[in-house]
């Protein structure tokens, strides 16, 4: 049965969203049903958010939840907490919000008026990034007191990409992903955002830290590894980029000749040399489902969710023989990562073919928390590779109203 409203009991006379009142003390609070943002600080404390500024907090490992109005009527796409008290959120109308009391009260730190912000990630209590449409990149180094707008270095596309995901690796470095297969990284707090070569133009929607690099997911079953490039891999990328530039110049030269114009070579400003570069590898998911979110633990346990799917990505090392230049023609055995994708199994009765899961987080113990369609909150475990519905926010008796758009209870 699909239930789209939350009902709470309050004392006295209350007014419902539709304008009706109840002298019996019953208050009909119509919470929007779809949920997107999932963030667990530890095994007990977690947050889930969605439409109309709705935030739900648990302090007992998901047994009971507090319903909180974040203070702005926006779709909350993502959350980032650095401890049990300090967290940030972004909304679809451009708000960046902060809480210092564990999510019970929030303040707007920045308003990117009219822009859709999609993700936010903090490395610590001071340093973080938010990204959104129109290649919007916002950075703070003082906990959000001030936000500075940054740009993609050397981006030469016709249309600015919508940026969908960002992960702060540490105070200085971060990786972002987005439309047109966009992958970029910074190693100096965002002074330079260098675009990585990605052979695919498929849109990426989410990115999670994975070892020294990251894993990203997106539309049409897209999964990619973003790993530190070896010297050989970087030489390969440089050769590809030079060939692409030569092809672009040849096309422009022929166009000028057809129109009987003088060909003036395009001046290409060389990008700064950096010590860190990434190599992008496609991971075959075997799927065409859209993938909406990815989460990884410190132990590199990776879980991906999307339309009618939840799966684990595992990494192993494959030994390969590589000849190296030497007088005795030595053959060196090296390793390269390989990846496998394994579906998690839904509990009996879970309507996986008819639903989507929009957000996921994995605790260090391997407990999976996810949320999605119509107020659904999902709990799973990597140890037994299964998951099921923990509760539905819209019909659960274990949700306590803390605050709403009409004031605190």
Image (cartoon, grey):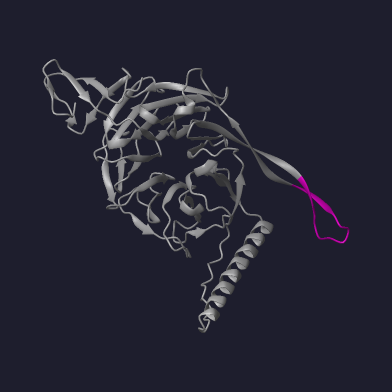
Where's residue 59, x and y in %? 37, 25
Toward the top, the furthest residue is: 24
Residue 105, by quadrant, is: top left
Question: 134 or 408: nearer the eye?
Answer: 134
User: Magenta part of the protein: which range?
Assistant: 320-334
Where's residue 3, x and y in %? 32, 22
- In the picture, measured across the screen, residue 210 lies left or right of residue 18, that is right
- Residue 85's place in the image compared with 387, above or below, is below
Is 329 magenta? The answer is yes
Question: 321 or 293: nearer the eye?
Answer: 293
Is 298 magenta? The answer is no
Where's residue 408, x and y in %? 19, 29
Where's residue 183, x and y in %? 51, 53
- In the picture, measured across the screen, residue 49 lies left or right of residue 232, that is left
- In the picture, measured across the screen, residue 223 lies left or right of residue 114, that is right
Toward the front, the furthest residue is: 258
* Residue 172 visible in the shown view: no
| Image point (41%, 59%), residue name | 160
* Residue 142 visible in the shown view: yes
Can you say which quadrant of the picture contains the C terminus?
top left
- Residue 149's place in the image compared with 269, above or below, is above
- In the picture, measured across the screen, residue 34 lies left or right of residue 336, that is left
| Image point (57%, 58%), residue name | 197
| Image point (58%, 43%), residue name | 211
Count the labels in the image. 0
Can you say which quadrant of the picture contains the N terminus?
top left
């Amino acid at each position: 049965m699909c239930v789209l409203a939350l009902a709470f009991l309050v004392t006295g006379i209350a007014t419902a969203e539709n304008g009706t009142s109840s002298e019996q003390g019953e208050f009909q609070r119509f919470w929007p049903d779809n949920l997107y943002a999932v963030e667990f600080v530890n095994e007990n404390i977690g947050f889930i958010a969605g439409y109309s500024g709705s935030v739900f907090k648990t302090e007992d490992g998901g047994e009971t939840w507090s319903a909180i109005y974040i203070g702005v009527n926006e779709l909350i796409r993502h959350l980032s907490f650095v401890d049990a008290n300090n967290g940030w959120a972004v909304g679809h109308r451009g708000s960046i919000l902060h809480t210092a009391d564990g999510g019970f009260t929030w303040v707007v730190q920045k308003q990117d008026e009219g822009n859709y912000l999609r993700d936010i990630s903090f490395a610590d209590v001071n340093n973080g990034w938010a990204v959104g449409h129109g290649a919007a990149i916002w950075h703070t180094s003082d906990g959000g007191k001030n936000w500075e707008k940054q740009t993609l270095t050397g981006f030469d596309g016709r249309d600015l990409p919508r940026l969908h995901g960002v992960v702060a690796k540490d105070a200085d470095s971060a990786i972002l992903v987005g439309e047109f297969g966009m992958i970029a990284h910074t190693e100096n707090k965002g002074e330079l955002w260098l675009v990585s070569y990605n052979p695919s133009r498929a849109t990426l929607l989410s990115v999670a830290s994975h070892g020294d690099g990251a894993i990203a997911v997106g539309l049409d079953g897209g999964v990619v590894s973003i790993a530190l490039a070896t010297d050989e891999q970087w030489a390969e990328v440089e050769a590809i980029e030079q060939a692409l530039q030569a092809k672009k110049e040849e096309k422009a030269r022929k166009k000028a000749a057809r129109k009987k114009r003088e060909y003036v070579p395009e001046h290409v400003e060389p990008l700064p040399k950096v010590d860190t570069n990434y190599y992008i590898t496609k991971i075959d998911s075997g799927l065409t489902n859209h993938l909406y979110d990815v989460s990884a633990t410190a132990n590199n346990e990776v879980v991906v969710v999307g339309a009618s799917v939840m799966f684990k990505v595992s990494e192993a090392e494959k030994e390969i023989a590589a000849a190296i230049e030497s007088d005795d023609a030595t053959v060196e055995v090296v390793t390269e990562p390989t990846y496998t994708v394994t579906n998690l199994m839904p509990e009996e009765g879970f309507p996986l073919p008819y639903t989507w899961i929009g957000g996921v987080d994995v605790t260090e113990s391997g407990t999976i928390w996810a949320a999605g369609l119509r107020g659904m909150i999902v709990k799973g475990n990597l140890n037994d590779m299964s998951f099921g519905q923990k509760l539905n926010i819209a019909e659960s008796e274990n949700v306590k109203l803390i605050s709403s758009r009409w004031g605190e209870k």
